[in-house]
Image: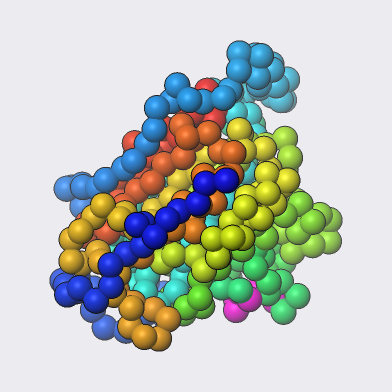
């Protein structure tokens, strides 16, 4: 298999420039989302859509499914995607405080991209997981890697609701309003040892979506899958275990029907504010090169046209629009 090499690792110990607008300790309570700026910037890496593995027969089959899935007689679906499962895996560790500004500024535009694609589909499920090994806000039996965050009362939900959002909760716009609330309200007190890949696998494990389990009903084998992964640190999964993570992923999902969008560190960005500088306590400043994620993706079976990355080291807003070409590649 392919693995990331040592050349991907970040340089350490270089001077670190603080972000001018983000200072002080991480917030522990509700956060107010800044207004959207008019100026946008960002770097997105996408690959040639011609590498997509979707065949004409698959497209024909999906189009027929879209027509058959409609209860009104009108075909539903976004291109050839009729039913969509969306998993957001968002780092909630202390170091993410430095990116709170651009992340909060970006949520509106990011969610608009999702809403545009979800409005015509037959059904959708949206789950949120974070980097905590035992999500502290969940009930005791649902504190394990990959347990979706249970709904917050302050975000128009309760722990008695399903742990994921769906079209039964309202329009996509309604759902993303509540989801935005949850992302900002969860705080930034998560584990400093961010097990993002474990959280992703746990959320996709069919056993955890079985009846009576914490994620009951979330993951549907027949639905196309979109994963949004946001973290400023490298996952601690060792290089010699990346193939195991990939094997489990392929067992749980169909990689050819999966899009993976990551907002992570870019090793090509040599801005001093982006160079990872450890603080000696498991956190740091800047953005660490996501070596483990790169190794996993190389082995995951997800077509290159369905993978995209956004540089997390932006001080204003993240440009997700081009990255959503990977979403469209799945549905085409």
Q: Which one is nearer the viewer's eye here, 76 or 100? A: 100
Q: Which one is nearer the viewer's eye here, 205 or 105? A: 205
Which residue sits at x=72%, y=54%? 205
Residue 104 to residue 167: above or below: below
135 inside magenta stretch:
yes
Which residue sits at x=79%, y=56%? 207
Q: Which one is nearer the viewer's eye here, 40 or 67? A: 40
Locate residue 206 relative to residue 307 in the image: left or right. right
Q: Position of residue 44 (x, y in %)?
A: 31, 43
Q: Position of residue 49 (x, y in %)?
A: 43, 25
Residue 29 to residue 122: above or below: below
Q: Is residue 147 visible?
A: yes
Which residue sits at x=25%, y=47%? 42
296 inside magenta stretch:
no
Locate residue 263 relative to residue 217 in the image: left or right. left
**Which quadrant of the view contains residue 225?**
top right
Residue 61 to residue 184: above or below: above
Q: Position of residue 125 (x, y in %)?
A: 63, 46
**Which quadrant of the view contains residue 282?**
bottom left
Which residue sits at x=67%, y=60%? 202
Magenta stretch, residue numbers: 134-139
**How many numbered marks, from 0 up?**
0
Residue 321 to residue 219: above or below: above
Magenta segment's dominant SS is: loop
Locate residue 163 relative to residue 277 in the image: left or right. right
- Furthest-right residue in this view: 211
Q: Position of residue 77 (x, y in %)?
A: 59, 26
Q: Is residue 177 visible?
A: no
């Amino acid at each position: 298999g392919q693995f990331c090499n040592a050349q991907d690792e970040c340089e350490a110990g270089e001077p670190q420039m603080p972000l001018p607008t983000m200072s002080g300790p991480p917030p522990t309570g509700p956060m107010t989302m800044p207004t959207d700026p008019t100026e946008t910037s960002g770097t997105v890496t996408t690959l040639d859509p011609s590498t997509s593995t979707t065949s004409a027969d698959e497209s024909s089959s999906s189009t027929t499914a879209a027509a058959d899935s409609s209860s009104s007689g009108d075909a539903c679906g976004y291109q050839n995607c009729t039913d969509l499962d969306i998993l957001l895996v968002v780092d909630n560790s202390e170091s993410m405080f430095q990116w709170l500004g651009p992340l909060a500024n970006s949520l509106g535009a990011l969610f608009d991209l999702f809403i545009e694609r979800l409005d015509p589909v037959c059904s959708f499920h949206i789950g949120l997981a974070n980097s905590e090994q035992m999500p502290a806000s969940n009930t005791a039996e649902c504190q394990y890697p990959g347990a979706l965050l249970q709904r917050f009362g302050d975000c128009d939900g309760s722990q008695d609701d399903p742990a994921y959002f769906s079209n039964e909760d309202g329009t996509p716009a309604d759902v993303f309003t509540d989801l935005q609330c949850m992302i900002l309200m969860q705080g930034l007190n998560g584990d400093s040892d961010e097990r993002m890949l474990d959280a992703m696998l746990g959320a996709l494990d069919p056993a955890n979506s079985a009846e009576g389990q914490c994620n009951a009903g979330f993951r549907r084998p027949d639905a196309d899958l979109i994963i949004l992964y946001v973290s400023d640190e490298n996952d601690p999964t060792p290089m010699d275990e990346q193939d195991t993570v990939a094997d489990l992923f392929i067992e749980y999902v169909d990689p050819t029907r999966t899009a993976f969008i990551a907002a992570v560190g870019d090793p090509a960005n040599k801005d001093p504010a982006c160079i990872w500088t450890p603080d000696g306590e498991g956190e740091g400043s800047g953005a660490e090169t996501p070596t483990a994620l790169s190794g996993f993706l190389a082995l995951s079976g997800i077509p290159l046209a369905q993978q995209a990355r956004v540089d997390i080291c932006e001080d204003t807003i993240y440009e997700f629009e081009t990255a959503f070409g990977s979403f469209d590649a799945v549905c085409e």
